[in-house]
Image (spheres, helix red, strand yellow):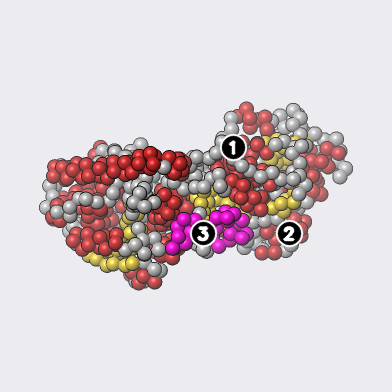
Amino acid sequence: MTEPTTDRPFAYTVANTIRCLSMDAVQEANSGHPGAPMGMADFAAVLITRFLKVCPSRPAWPDRDRFVLSAGHASMLLYSALHLLGFDLSLEEIRRFRQWGSRTPGHPEAGLTPGVETTTGPLGQGFGNAVGMALAERMLAARFNEGDRDLVDHYTYVIASDGDMMEGVQAEAASLAGHLGLGKLIVYYDSNRITIDGPTPITFSEDVGRRFAALGWHVLTVDGHDHPALESALEIAREETERPSLIVGRSHIAYGSPGKQDTPASHGAPLGEEEIRRTKENLGWPVEPPFHVPGEVREFFARRRTVLEREADWWEMKLADLRREDPGRAREWDRFQAGEIPVELPLPGFAAGEEIATRKASHACLAAFAEAVPFLVGGSADLAASNKTDFPGGAEVRREDFGGRILRFGIREHAMGAVANGLALHGGLRPLAATFLVFSDYCRPAIRLAALMGLPVLYVFTHDSIFVGEDGPTHQPVEHLAALRAIPGLAVLRPADATETAAAWETALRRRDGPTALVLSRQGLPVLDRSELAPAEGVSRGAYVLSGAEEDPDLILLASGSEVSLILETAARLRAGGRKVRVVSVPSFELFLAQDRAYREAVLPPSCPRRLAVEAGVRQGWDRWLGPGGSFHGMTRFGASAPAAEIARRFGFTADHITRLAEALIGETVDS
């Protein structure tokens, strides 16, 4: 930046503006957290007046700094800062804090409020997102920066709280960031030593700075209200290129409040009119009117916006030079930024009758389209050989070389989910994250946030059922399909064979309005003969008639994944006895539900209430498709440790057993 050093007394005025806007907004809403933004205001003031490189008129400028409020309960700090900087966030929206339809919800929401980089509130998740953003910056810089043309050169700043530091996801993400040496990640830890239940020593006695130093971070400790010290710490942190930096700021919650500073009372409730009056008097601030922003503050940020606009204009000139001098590379840049999937996506074919685990079919798909989708990056939580998620011929991302696309997350499923969200939020990359389905529980908070934000994160969850076998119930997912299907906005795809797997991959890649989970088998599954069955294009619609398209079937059999071949065998037996049977593959509840009613009723005609669904999981969610006359065969308990064939026999996943269930549902016996 070319701007001279901030006038320090003036920066205190900016800090007090943030404090008073925050306490006024919480009081107006009669809801919120005033104490945290009041304590964090000094760091925010130094950051936005001196360092933060953003362009309010172009909030999606690719080379902007990312500013993440991991302590999302302090949302009024962020809203106040964005308002002062000149983002499209009016004072009226500040007044409407936490109200229906406002741009200032209780916790920051990406996509709703200009300048908000990620949805935060669940503590530690924003920290993990920021690690993903900083990682994306390094990976894109390695690919696109050449000579003095640095299209990608920005910092990721984070404000984290004591609560963030207690969460496990933060510890995992910090470990990964230190391992990779993400030198352009700068975290300010607002150590006010207060949580809802009281002072932090009642639960938290670790030395956070020493822990981060052990993780490979560069650590500085300052008075969180001393502007020269904060400014110096930020300058030093920006110069450290080999390690991420943690600035430990010793601060006071509700700074300036005579009656509530340093108390839990200021954490999650308004200060009250009388305490606000006393606080403003203590800060030398006008008591009236509320939501006061001094004219000199407005004038300063008007000048600062001019500086920031010049920064963005200069970057646009560099991009224009690239378009003129190297149009091929410029097209590649545009393609990465747009996440453009080829119209014709190269996918493998599979021979009917061959036995292929869908996880192996998935790897064949990755090998086929990896070059055509170069912005797809990611990897596994230490299970790449089992998940089959390495890009053939791809290089690993390492501390000394960010030019690869394979990410080694280590045994850090919590962080993997949060980092994947950060990669997606940053832009320019499409993240893939993989583990066993049973460990999706460890990723669940991040998956939920990906769905809430509509992020196109791709999850590959393998070892999808009790047929994992000998590993036993700790590794056999039973409730996980139902649990994932319960998340609004997440599309869960469980393909029946290799051909459906290819169709599922294409569906997932083309889906841009939310996350997608591919749920894949460990065991081999027969490749279905598409010359006798419907083509797998129906996967994109969530469910389709695989065989038996008669208008008036006696029975409809439904299944997903490995159980589809089982109900096909059952259908063959029933047809031999003269019954008309329709077989429906249901790889995705969510995509099927998104179809119009006419299509859904064409697949599942209301005239046939006799329906039997088979899935090696719990029933939850299936009744929507079964109706009042339907039945379900699945799991009502955890699995067991035994070979897969024995597991199938013991739990009734055999053609003999399913045929008997079908016969009972039809109402008469058919010879099997």
Q: Which mark is residue 145?
A: none
* Three-letter code for the amino acid on which mark 2 is drawn: Ala
Q: Residue at x 72, y 53 (%)?
A: 524
Q: Amino acid at mark 3?
A: Glu
Q: Which mark is residue 344?
A: 1
Report the residue at 62% width, 47% height from top.
368
Residue 256: image quadrant is: bottom left
Which span is picked out in magenta?
379-404
Which is in the foreground here, disc 3 or disc 2?
3
Magenta residue check for 298: no
Residue kind at label 1, given as amino acid type:
Glu
The magenta stretch spans residue 392: yes
Q: CA distance from mark 1 to mark 2?
A: 38 Å
- N-terminal of the two: label 3 or label 1? 1
Answer few, some or many: residues within 10 Å of disc 1's Cα (few below 14, many 20 plus, some between 14 and 19): few
> In terms of depth relative to the viewer, which is nearer, 531 or 647?
531
User: 630 above or below 236?
Assistant: above
Which of the marked residues, 3 or 2, is nearer the chain's N terminus? 3
**Label drawn at residue 644:** 2
Distance CA(mark 3)–CA(mark 2): 34 Å
What element does badge 2 sit on?
helix
What residue did someone put label 3 on? 396
Q: Position of residue 365 (x, y in %)?
A: 62, 48
* Alpha carbons under labels 3 and 1: distance apart: 27 Å
